[in-house]
Amino acid sequence: MNRLAIKACADILGESFRQNLPADVQLSYYFKNNRNLGSVDRGAIAEIYYGVIRNKRLLEEIVGDAHCKKMILVYLLVLKGHSIKELNEVTDEYEIEWLIDKKKNKVHIDSWPKKLSLPDWIWTKLTLYYGEEEAIALATALLKPATLQLRVNSLKASSVKDVVDEFRLSFPAEADKIKQTEWSKQAITLPRGTPIQKHPLFLGGSIEVQEEGSQLLSLLLDAKRGHMVADFCAGAGGKALALSALMKNTGRIYAFDISDRRLANLKQRLKRSGASNIAMQRISNENDLKIKRLRNKLDRVLVDAPCTGLGTLRRNPDLKWRQTEESLSELTIKQASILEAASKLCKKGGYLVYATCSILNDENEDIVTQFLKKNKHFKIIPQHTIMQKHGVNIGDGDFLKLTTHTHKTDGFFGALMERVD
């Protein structure tokens, strides 16, 4: 920690708050324009930057406004445990006097959403869905940064154990923190910030960056060798690549997305992965002719719907400040439309999975309930009937519901449905 890091952080935060840009985009832009920064400075800046964003509402309550420099200093003093003496070396005298006064005259924070740095509307929904005690546990877990999680690519890697062993040799200081995860048999976890991008395992396609919960959603689809599969809203293709490995690189996976940029990322990942059964398809919307030609033909359809992303706040803490009740309402309309269109691709006996990385019922159970009321030819298949076949016991509920405080994953939702007529 030094003056440069604190000043840089204040500048980036100010721009981020003013422009309402995604936090990672703003940070990448700053680093791109300040290439002289070393890895230590970059790491310090990123740590403080995301820490303030995670705790923005609490810090504003303590500071009294959204003054970026003061929020940073309070974050370092109150939440990171730095001493006044340490901060005296990296800031100005009048700010130290202000900090000393704040330390003496502590601000009383009078509500949970302020303490847990959540907008009121999100807190209201969480307490409605989960009850106050569980909402507190969930929100607290989402305040903590996530580790780096990878999927071991069975098309390239000999075994998960071999990958773990190789990473432990490569990063001996972190060896005890490199291990398999609890739920997904193909997932491993490494300390946040581990530099894997130039590692031979990454360059050779033996691993992919994919959160454990996302891997479990791929299992829920229960795709088999030779199946015809669609991945709606494929994005950069993490789930499509996982499905390819599960299908032993057989059959066909149609990876649909409206974004050329995201599909370009998938193209790069395909080159590394060894997957040859994925066909990328750029579409204009969920009713594109490229989709309609597959009507009633597919064995499996995955709808990885656009959502608020509130289950990923450990990785994307700015989403809670960028999403609103209005954007949620717009998303639920879009989600229902995409699910309706995607369902038409399922043949009789085919499986349809609706998935989000949200923790809100509005985007999850409510969408599925609404869909099933309109589409009597689909029925729910309880998730445990599939997941337990894969050696995963999440519980006996109909839906795959992952929460950070319970499962130590990002928040995910998955509903498995079968076309019966």
Image (cartoon, rainbow, N blue to C red):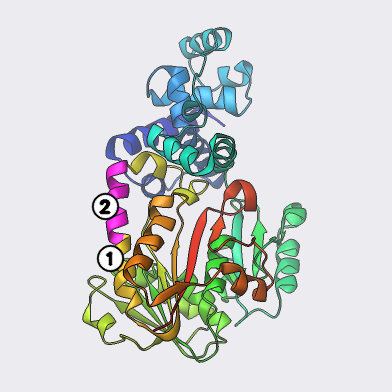
Q: Which of the labelled discs sits on residue 337, or is there none?
A: 1
Picture quarter with the N terminus: top right
Q: Say whether residue 332 is magenta.
A: yes
Q: Amino acid at mark 1?
A: Ser
Please give the range of residues in magenta. 325-334
Q: Is residue 388 magenta?
A: no
Quadrant where the C terminus is found in the figure: bottom left
Left/right of residue 128 with respect to residue 377 in the rendered view: right
On the image, the x and y values in percent for residue 338 come to 31, 67
Measured along the vertical axis of the image, is residue 67 above or below residue 401? above
Dot 2 amino acid type: Glu
Q: Residue at x 29, y 73 (%)?
A: 341
- Asked if residue 411 lies left or right of residue 232, the reply is right
Instruction: Indicate left or right for 187 with 367 as reference.
Output: right
Which label sits on residue 397? none
Disc 2, SS: helix
